[in-house]
Image: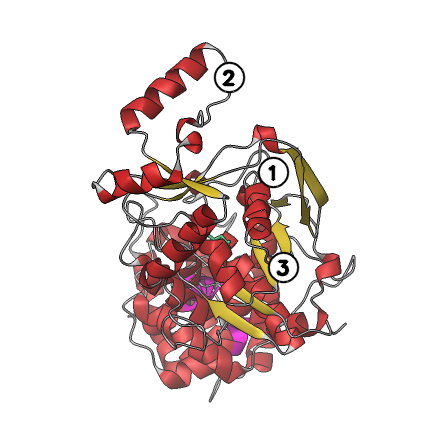
Amino acid sequence: MLDPQPARVRFAPSPTGRFHIGGARTALYDFLLARQTGGQFILRIEDTDRKRFVPSAEDEIIESLHWLGLDWDEGPDIGGPYSPYRQSERTDIYRQHAEELVAHGHGYYCFCTPERLSQVRQRQQKLKQPPRYDGLCRKLDIEEARGRIADGESYVIRFKTPREGSTAAVDLLRGPITVENSSLDDYILLKSDGLPVYHLAAMVDDYLMEITHVFRGSEWLPTFPLHVLIYEALNWKQPIWVHLSIFLNPSGKGKMSKRDAGVREIYVLDLKQMGYLPEGLLNWIALMGWSYDDHTEFFTLEDLIEKFSLQKLHPSPAAVDYKKLDHFNGNHIRSLTTSELVDQLRPHFEREGLIVNEEILQEITPLVQERIRTLEEAVEIAGFFFREAPEPEPSELVGKKMTIDESIEAIRRSSEVVESFTTLDVESLEEALRALAEDLGLKAGQLFGILRIAVTGQRISTPLIESMVVIGKEEVLNRIAHALEKLESYTGAT
Ligand code: GLU
C-alpha cells in the first residue's frame, strides 16, 4: 500500500563502534519507507559525543550501507539541501536553539560543578530518592547567570522540565506513553564544552531537516517524553515516532548484547566475510520487527519496497535466529544466476589464497549452488578444485566396514572403470560405478566414500561424480593411482 505523503526519513548513527544488525535494520526500514513513498532517505552522522567517538566508525557505516544496497539521497559524503549532515559541523545551530529555549523560559544555565552534583547524588542515594538534578540553578536570575558566563564561569544548559502535569508521548507501535512530568529530570541539553547531547541535537536536526518519521531503537523510550517536551517548547510539529523492537540473543533469553558477538557475528561487515549475501541479510533483518503475512518469507529488496508497511511493524522483541539467516541466505543464493554467483564466490576462494581457474569456477558453481547456505561453505566443499592434488591419509581410504584389501580392490576396479571411458560424463560414469559397487557386494555409499577421499581429499564435497567429470579423466586416474599406492603400502598401523 502506498503511503500518500513522500516520507523524509533519516538514519542517524553515532560513530561510536562497529556497525551491527540493529543499525542495519533501522536503516532498512528508513530506506523502505523513503523508496516506497517516493521520499528521501537521509544519512546523518551524530558525532557530538567526542569521548565515545571512533574515527573508523563512519567509514564502516558507509561501507556497510553501500554493501547492503541502502543508498541515501542526502548525507555527509554527498551533501544535500540541508547540509551539513555531520552534527559536529552544526554546533552553532544547536547552541542557537539551546539559547532560544532559555530565552523562552524552557531552559536555564546551570553552573553546578561535578563535585556538587556528586554530593547531591550521594544524598539522594542515602535517602533512596531517584538520582536527579536538584534544581538549584533553575531559580537563578537570568541576568545574574549571564554575568557569571561573561566572567568565564563554566556552565551547561538544562531543559526546564515542567514540574506539574503529565506528558503523553505517542509511539506508532505502542500508542500513547504517559508520564508524570515530576518524574522527569532537568536534562542537560548543551554540555560545558559547548557541544549538544543527543536530546537537543537530534530534535533540532529532525525538525530542521523536515523529518516525517523517526525510526529508532527502543533504548530511547525512557527519554521519549523529554523529546516530546522539547518539540512542544519550541512549538514544532512532531514527526511520527517509531521505536523498533529490541533484539534478543539467539537463546531468546535476554537482550542481545555485544557479548553475544563471537557466538555468531552481529557486525554487518563480519557477516559479509562469513559469506552472507546482502539479500539474505536484508531478508532476515526485515522480518525482525515486521511481517508481511504469516507465511511469506522470501523477499528481495524490491519486494520489500513494495510490501513494507508501517501497520505491520510490531514492537515485540525479535530473537536473533542464525538458523533463519542461513535459511534465507541459502534461498537467495539459489535465486542468483550462475554468473552472479560466480562473481560472489570468486573473492571467497581468493581470500583462502586459492588461485581460481575461471573455467572450473563456472563449472562448479551450479554444483555448489544447491547445497550451500553461505558463500564460505562453497570454499569448504569445493576449495579442492583449486588446490594441488590431495594427499589423503591412508586410513581414510579404507571404506566403511571394509578391510584394507577390499578397499584396495575397490580402488583398482574403479580405476579400470574410469579408464574404460574416452571422456567422462555424469550419467554413464555414475551408472558404471554403481554397477561396480554391486559387483563388489558393496553399497554405493561405501565405494563413493573411498573415491571421494581419493579424488577430492575431503569427506564432504561437491557431488562426487560431477566433481570427477570436472576434474577430468586423466587427473582422476592420477589421483586414484596415487591413492592406491598409499593404500598398498598401508598396514593398518596408525
Ligand atoms: N545517534 C543515535 C544512536 O545512534 C540515533 C538515534 C536516533 O535514530 O534518533 O542511537
- The front one of 429 and 146 is 146
Q: Which residues are magenta?
A: 366-382
**Dot placed on the residue nearer the N-terminal end, 2 or 1:** 2
Q: What mark, if any, has residue 252 been given in the picture?
A: 1
Q: Would the CB of label 1 be found within 8 Å of ligand 1? A: no
Q: Amino acid at mark 1?
A: Gly
Dividing the picture into quarters, in which one does residue 179 lie?
top right
Q: Residues within 10 Å of mark 3 (few under 14, many from 20)?
A: few
Instruction: Read off the residue under disc 2.
Output: 129
Which residue is disc 3 drawn over?
237
Decide: few, some or many residues near mark 1? Use Cα within 10 Å; few <14, some 14-19, many ≥20.
some
Mark 2 vs ligand 1: CB below 8 Å: no
Coordinates of residue 366 in the picture (x, y in percent) = 54, 77
CA distance separating discs 2 and 1: 34 Å
Determine whether the residue tagged by mark 1 lies in a helix, strand or loop: loop
Name which residue type carries label 3: Lys
